[in-house]
Amino acid sequence: MPMKSSTTLPSKLFDIFNYVFLAIFALLMLLPLMYVLSGSLTSDAELALKKVVLIPMEPTFDSYNYILKSGIIFQSLMYSVLITVVGTGINIFSTALMAYPLSRTTLRGRSILMKLIVFTMLFSGGMIPTYILVKELGLLNSYWSLWLPTAISAFNLILMKNFFQNLPDSIEEAAKIDGCNDMQILFRMALPLSMPSIAALTLFYAVSNWNSFFNALMYIQDSNKWPIQVWLQQIVILSQGGYDPNDSLTEFVKPPETVKLAVISVATIPILCIYPFLQKHFAKGVLLGSVKG
C-alpha cells in the first residue's frame, strides 16, 4: 500500500509563496547594485537617453580610466583600506579585552558596568562635546580621531560577552590549573574558541569603518587624508554643480553621471568582497552571541 505524502497542499503553497517572496525581495536588493555597476560601464550619451540602464549596449571603461588617472580616488581608497584594517583590529582587540571580564560572574560591579554600557546605547555626549574632546586630545586631522572614539561598540560588546559566557567554565578552570593567568586564558583559549563570533563582529566593524563618513568629514581637515566616502560626497556635490569656483576642490573636474556611478562601485565592491570569506561564520556567531543576556 503506497504511503501518503507528508507534504500537504497548504504546506506546498506556503513554500511557493516563500520562494516567490524571497526571489522578489532579492531582486529588489540587486537592482540598485546592477544599475550602479551597469551605469558606470555605460557611455554618457546612452545614459542620458535611457536614464536607467541595466545592460549597456556599448560597455566602456572611460569612467574607471578617469578615476585611476586622477589619482585622488585611488589614494583615498588606500586610506579607506588603512582606516578599515587598523580600525577593525583596534575594535576587536578592545572589545575582547572588555567583553571577557564582563562575561565572568566573579567580576565585582559587573551588573553596574553592564547598565552603564547599555546606557551609552541610548544616550551619548553629543556631537559638540565629542568634537571638543577630540580636539583637546590633539587628535584632529589624525586617523586616531576615527579609531579611538569608536573603539568599542556597546552592541558588539554585548554579543561578544554573551559568546564568552557560553564557553564551558571547565576550560577556564583547566587553564588556571596549568598556570595560565587571565590574559593567557583570553588569548590562548577564549579567542581561538570564539572565531565564529569574532568573524561576525569583524564584518560589523569593517563595514562601519569602511562607511565612516561623518567623523572623517568632521575630524580630518586635510583633504589629502580623506577616505573614499568623503570624496564620494564631494564628487556628488560637484556633479550637481554645488561648488565654489574659488574652492580648491574644483581642481577635480566636475564629473559626469557615469563617473559618479563608477566611484560608487569602487567604494562598494571592496567591502562586498569580504563577506563571502566570513559568511560561514556570520550566522553562527550572531546566534551564539544572542543566547544569554
Image: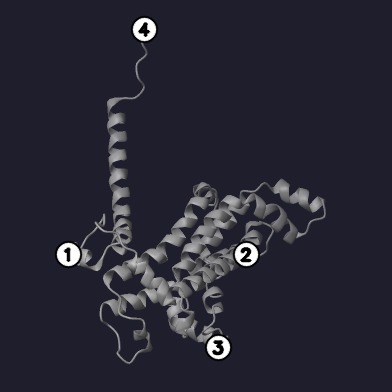
Residue nearest the observer in this picture, 183 or 78: 78
Q: Earlier in the sequence, mark 4 or mark 2?
A: 4
Residue nearest the observer in this picture, 62 or 83: 62
- For the residues labelled 3 and 1, the Cα–Cα distance comes to 53 Å
Q: Earlier in the sequence, mark 1 or mark 2?
A: 1
Q: Which residue is tagged 1?
A: 49
Q: Quadrant of residue 4?
A: top left
Quadrant where the N terminus is found in the figure: top left
Q: Which residue is tagged 4?
A: 1
What residue is rendered at 45% in x and 77% in y? Answer: 215
Please report contact status of discs 3 and 1: CB closer than 8 Å, yes or no.
Answer: no
- For the residues labelled 1 and 2, the Cα–Cα distance comes to 51 Å
* Kind of residue at disc 3: Glu
Please report contact status of discs 1 and 2: CB closer than 8 Å, yes or no.
Answer: no
Q: Which residue is tagged 2?
A: 93
Please report contact status of discs 3 and 4: CB closer than 8 Å, yes or no.
Answer: no
